[in-house]
Image (cartoon, rainbow, N blue to C red):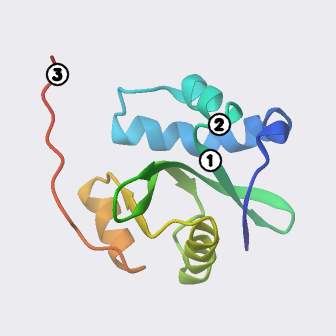
Amino acid sequence: MNVFQLNPDYLHHHWEQIAKYLQPALDLSEVEEFNLDQMKVFIVTKQWTLFVVEENAKICGAVVVCFANYPNDLIAYVTAIGGKFISSKETSNKFKELLKSMGATKIQGGARESVARLWKRIGFTNKQILVECKL
């Protein structure tokens, strides 16, 4: 499997294939802060970065990352992930190297318990619990 950053100029050509992996991820995680269409706008305007996984020249997974600069780290925060992405150590290692080459020093993301268990298999640790209060 090959992992690469998709140039946002070509997003419209592949959006249908990519959206089918991202929409279920948003649905399962019950994201309220943005929807799929808004995510697309953030990708096209280069505020968020889209990576895709290809197998046999077909898209089989996608992940969207928002970079956040902190005094000690450049965090690659995963806003959505779906498809065959972190199911293999090889693919996740390629993804990590790609992020590292872009300056990231850490990867973070919000996850349900089941997803957090999956991420642990590829080197992630539980750092904190996210709490929320709608105002």
Instruction: Compare marks 1 and 2 and give the one earlier in the sequence.
Output: 2
Q: How far separated are the C-alphas under marks 1 and 2?
A: 6 Å
Q: Residue at x 86, y 36 (%)?
A: 13
Question: Of callouts 2 and 3, which one flags the residue occurring earlier in the amino acid sequence?
Answer: 2
- Foreground: 103 or 1? 103
Q: Please, what is the three-letter code of the amino acid marked with disc 1? A: Thr
Label 2 environment density (alpha carbons within 10 Å; few <14, some 14–19, many ≥20): many
Q: Is residue 43 left or right of residue 115?
A: right
The image quarter containing residue 113 is bottom left
Q: Label 3 to label 1, Cα distance in Å?
A: 27 Å
> In the rendered structure, which amino acid carries the disc numbered 2?
Ile
Element at label 2: helix
Alpha carbons under labels 2 and 3: distance apart = 26 Å
Q: Residue under circle 3?
A: 134
Could you tell me the amino acid type at mark 3? Answer: Lys
Looking at the figure, which quarter contains the C terminus? top left
